[in-house]
Image: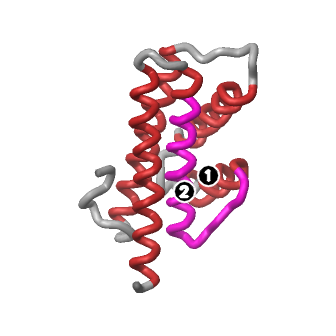
Amino acid sequence: MTGKYSLASKLRTMLDKAIEDIDLALKIINGGPCRVASSRAYYATFYAMEAALLSKGLLRSKHGGVISAFNQYFVKTGILPSHFGALISNLFSCRNVADYEFESTIDESEAKRHIQAAQEIVGAITEHLIKEGFIDASGVGD
């Protein structure tokens, strides 16, 4: 197995996990706790950001580090849209509410916005990785 194949395999696995979490969030939103759907939407975005960073040979161990590096290398440079910074910040904040706060809630319309944001970000990262030749278009999300 060559280094490039190994990287492509890792990136595809990370993106598949992101897509799986989006699918799970969509299932949860239909009758399940909206806070869990929001949390899965954040994690889908997180896995895709990790894949983007890995394509540059970058690894970060904490959520804040992943978000900061992603913004530095992909958002601020214009590789990906500038509004992603705000979307990701909101997703992270709402994930903290969803996972750690007991008195706050996330309603269905908010959770749906989180899922839409995750779909947009994961889709853009996937397209970027395809365009740059890190992965091929076949089988993404299968």
- In screen coordinates, is 68 left or right of 40? right
Badge number at residue 79: none
Q: CA distance from mark 1 to mark 2?
A: 6 Å
Horizontal side of 78 relative to 19 (left or right) equals right
Instruction: Name which residue type carries label 1.
Output: Asn
The quadrant where residue 91 appears: top right
Which residue is at 41% across, 85% downward? 2
Q: Nearer the viewer, residue 136 or 21?
A: 21
Instruction: Check disc 1 and report its element: helix, strand or loop.
Output: helix
Amino acid type, mark 2: Phe
Magenta-highlighted residues: 38-62
Colour theme:
secondary structure
Instruction: Point out residue 104 in the picture as x, y percentages from the top left corner.
Output: 71, 15
**Residue at (58%, 72%) from the top-left corner?**
57
- Residue 105 on the magenta segment: no
Task: Tell me if residue 44 is in the magenta stretch.
Answer: yes
Is the residue 40 above or below the residue 97 in the image?
below
How many residues crowd around disc 2 within 10 Å: few (fewer than 14), some, or many (20 or more)? some
Near-viewer residue (42 or 23): 23
Mark 2 secondary-structure assignment? helix
Label at residue 71 = 1
Labelled pair 1, 2 in contact (Cβ < 8 Å):
yes
| Residue 44 on image: x %, y % | 50, 43
Q: Residue 74 — which label?
A: 2
Majority secondary structure of the magenta segment?
helix
Where residue 37 appears, x then y in whole percent? 51, 28
**Can you give x and y, in whole percent of width and height, for residue 129 in the image?**
40, 62
Which residue shows up at 51% across the image and 60% down it?
52
